[in-house]
């Protein structure tokens, strides 16, 4: 989801017979539920896949600030403004926890930024959709953070220690995000007709992009098996998507809103909701860079990075100068 | 990339009399900014009453591949544990 299309080695899962002794020992540690820590031996492909996954996840948190940042100065009340500001600040924090987890695998922060800014690493497709009205702040918190929670809760048990610990911190903070979004939706649904329509419109636009957050259907997820064996992916894309629909459909009903899917219905046999798949063509187009906001998001990030360069260098120069002065004084 | 801010490890002591605990890392140009950033990144919800920051390069860590010889001296000394000593129940709680 926040890491939707993480390529692994592409070689498929090795059987115990195909592994060498070191790989076998590694896999059995994972099977026994042990955590892998930064200085432990790990297969090169495990390291590489994790850097991609944690990196994508971190980039999503950082870029994910932009659609909501769009409304901070236009929040309808001071209280809503404070709530949104706190939420967006949390997302910055989430990005930072995750970057530092990725760095323990031997990639530098600047390399990660560089890969984001040059398009070599992706972030979640969801953040390439625009936030057109205040109701979108409700829909994003409710649906996007809701989908993020679905994916992140199981990742607290992931095999890589620093990643698992970052997820624990993140999960503690996420539930406020979803609740503040749902609270906005509730308020609008109990407001004027126009406000309720605005909430419905936000749901209409964010429903399918939220379903896409879990990544392609299992039959098209070529990289999942190895990641699941390594416990860096805990559930299949379709399972998580189903769980999300099961949780969200009754909430929409509570709000008095209609999920934009004729096929959505509770299935008594499976005790789950049936629902329509999102348009996967659109998903792949957004991933390729052709979503409504891809160019804008990336340009904003690049500009923030290059505009901040003189500050980063100035502060470093000041720190060096102070250090040198201290040394000569001593 | 040439001039990346150094990496700092952050340790925080919570409210309840526990020791400082490692919570993560961050980048900052100097110790003052590292402290400010640690507050903003790791204590947004009253997580701590005391923060330590230390540059990552100044930490010496044990090597997991030497786990065997490193901890052997303690593994071979079962008599350091209370259960090693058989005391009859009649002696009372001890
Ligand atoms: Fe987040
Ligand atoms: Fe969030």
Image (cartoon, rainbow, N blue to C red):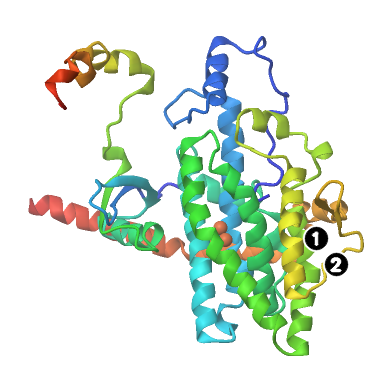
Front-most of A216 and A254? Answer: A254
Residue A155 falls left or right of residue A127: left
Return the x and y of residue A161 as percentages of the image width and height. Answer: 47, 36
Please, which residue is most extreme toward the left here?
A330
Q: Can you tell which quarter of the image residue A130 is in?
A: bottom right
Q: Which mark is residue A208?
A: 1
Q: Mark 2 = which residue?
A: A260
Work out whether residue A51 can be spotted: yes
Mark 1–mark 2 Cα distance, whole angstroms, equals 9 Å
Front-most of A219 and A223? Answer: A219
Q: Secondary structure at mark 1?
A: helix
Give ligand 1's quarter of the image.
bottom right
Residue A313 falls left or right of residue A117: left
Front-most of B23 and B53? Answer: B23
Q: Can you tell which quarter of the image residue B15 is in?
A: bottom left
Q: Residue at horizontal 75%, vertical 50%?
A: A241
Q: Can you tell which quarter of the image residue A219 is in?
A: top right
Dot 1 or dot 2: first in sequence order is: 1
Return the x and y of residue A163 as percentages of the image width and height. Answer: 50, 41
Label 1–label 2 contact, CB within 8 A: yes
Q: Nearer the viewer, mark 1 or mark 2?
A: 2
């Amino acid at each position: 989801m926040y890491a939707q299309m993480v390529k692994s080695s592409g070689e498929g899962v090795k059987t115990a017979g195909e592994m060498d002794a070191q790989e076998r020992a590694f896999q059995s540690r994972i099977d026994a539920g042990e955590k892998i820590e930064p200085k432990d031996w790990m297969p090169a492909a495990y390291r590489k896949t994790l850097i991609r996954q944690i990196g994508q996840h971190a980039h999503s948190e950082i870029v994910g600030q932009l659609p909501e940042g769009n409304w901070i100065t236009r929040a309808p009340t001071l209280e809503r403004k404070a709530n949104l500001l706190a939420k967006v600040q949390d997302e910055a924090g989430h990005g930072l926890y995750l970057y530092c987890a990725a760095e323990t695998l031997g990639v530098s922060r600047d390399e990660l930024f560089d890969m984001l800014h040059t398009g070599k690493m992706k972030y979640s497709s969801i953040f390439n959709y625009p936030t057109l009205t205040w109701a979108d702040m409700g829909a994003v918190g409710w649906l996007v953070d809701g989908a993020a929670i679905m994916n992140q809760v199981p990742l607290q048990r992931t095999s890589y220690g620093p990643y698992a610990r970052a997820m624990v911190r993140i999960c503690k903070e996420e539930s406020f995000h979803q609740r503040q979004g749902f609270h906005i939706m509730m308020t609008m649904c109990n407001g004027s007709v126009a406000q309720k329509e605005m909430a419905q419109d936000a749901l209409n636009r964010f429903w399918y992009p939220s379903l896409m957050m879990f990544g392609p259907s299992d039959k098209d997820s070529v990289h999942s098996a190895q990641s699941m064996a390594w416990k860096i992916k805990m559930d299949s894309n379709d399972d998580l998507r189903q769980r999300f629909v099961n949780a969200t459909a009754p909430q929409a009903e509570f709000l008095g809103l209609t999920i934009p899917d004729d096929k959505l219905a509770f299935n008594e046999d499976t005790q789950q909701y049936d629902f329509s798949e999102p348009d996967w063509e659109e998903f792949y187009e957004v991933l390729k860079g052709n979503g409504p906001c891809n160019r804008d998001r990336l340009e904003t990030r690049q500009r923030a990075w290059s505009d901040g360069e003189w500050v980063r260098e100035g502060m470093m120069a000041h720190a060096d100068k102070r250090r040198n002065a201290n040394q000569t004084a001593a | 990339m040439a001039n990346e801010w150094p990496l700092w490890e952050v340790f925080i002591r919570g409210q309840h009399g526990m020791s400082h605990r490692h919570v993560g890392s961050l980048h900052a140009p100097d110790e003052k900014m590292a402290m400010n950033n640690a507050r903003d990144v790791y204590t947004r919800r009253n997580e701590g009453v005391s923060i330590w920051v230390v540059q990552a390069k100044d930490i010496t860590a044990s090597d997991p591949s030497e786990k065997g010889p490193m901890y052997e001296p303690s593994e071979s000394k079962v008599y350091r544990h209370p259960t090693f000593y058989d005391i009859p129940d009649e002696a009372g709680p001890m």
